[in-house]
Amino acid sequence: MKKLFILLLITCSTTFAQNDTKAKALLNEVSEKVKGYDNIAIKFKYVLENVSENIKQETHGDVTMQGDKYKLNILGITRLFDGKKLHTISPEDEEVTVSSENNDEEGTITPSKMLSFYEDGFSYKMDIIQNVRGRKIQYVKLTPIDSKATIKYILLGIDAQTKHIYNLIEIGENDTKTTLTVNSFKTNEPISKTLFTFDQSKYKDYYINKLD
């Protein structure tokens, strides 16, 4: 779970020093396009692979984002952030955990940052171009500046035509490969005004765990 959430946590960086100018221009273009949308709805597939350990895990999820607010469904759990409070709803445990979202804490889920591609602590450069079912996918390679990082590199795949994210591939030091692939990307959809609001009346039998 933490691995998935770290993968979703793509935070903005303010420095472009020693980075590929073409990569910088592409990432800027993607970022500006994303900022122009009122809301974004994504369905995605997440795959974790480690060949040496004979591990392959696959799951699907979806997230709707509007500004800092979001509703994320993954592994049977719903995470609802209204801009102030994060509600983690677990039907299996019949429990709702309420907390303040801390964007500075490693592993914190911030899907609203999912489409900002300047990750702090990484250098970046243009990588390969692939043709995926008629779509030209341009990859940007992000390499950790910290030599002690547990990540070897990240490949960010961007649709050259739409300037939307196609996938994100992370390679770890232990050769574990995690891939987040966007299956559906919709923008400016009509959404309910209460989509990001937690309705406690629907969870009367749930244990409400308030962390702060």
Image (cartoon, grey):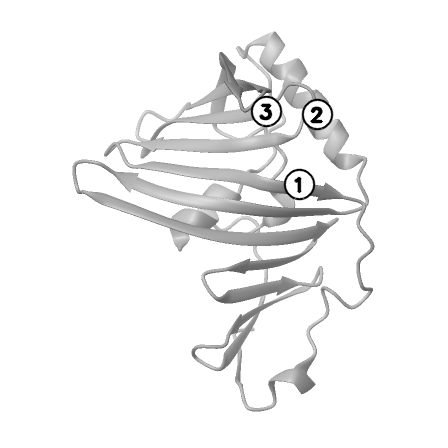
For marks 2 and 1 on the same chain, the one whose residue lies earlier in the sequence = 2
Which residue: 69% across, 51% down?
Answer: 65
- Helix, strand or loop at mark 2: loop
Identified by mark 3, the residue type is Ile
The quadrant in which residue 53 appears is top left
50 with respect to 76 (left or right): left
Whether residue 106 appears in this view of the structure is no
| Residue 158 disc label | 3
Placement of the C terminus among the 4 image quadrants = bottom right
Marks 3 and 1 sit apart, C-alpha to C-alpha, by 13 Å
Which residue: 74% across, 65% down?
Answer: 195
| Residue 185 disc label | 1
- Helix, strand or loop at mark 3: strand
Q: Position of residue 137 (x, y in %)?
A: 56, 20
Identified by mark 1, the residue type is Phe
- Helix, strand or loop at mark 1: strand
Find out whether the residues at labels 2 and 1 contact each other: C-beta distance under 8 Å: yes
**196 relative to 50, above or below:** below
From the image, tell me which residue sits under label 2: 162
Marks 3 and 2 sit apart, C-alpha to C-alpha, by 8 Å
Q: Which class describes the residues within 10 Å of circle 2: few (<14), some (14-19), or many (20+)?
A: few
Placement of the N terminus among the 4 image quadrants = bottom left
Q: Which class describes the residues within 10 Å of circle 1: few (<14), some (14-19), or many (20+)?
A: some
Whether residue 62 appears in this view of the structure is yes
**130 relative to 9, above or below:** above
Nearer mark to the viewer, of 3 and 1 = 1
188 with respect to 76 (left or right): right
For marks 3 and 1 on the same chain, the one whose residue lies earlier in the sequence = 3
173 with respect to 151 (left or right): left
Q: Number of labelled discs?
A: 3
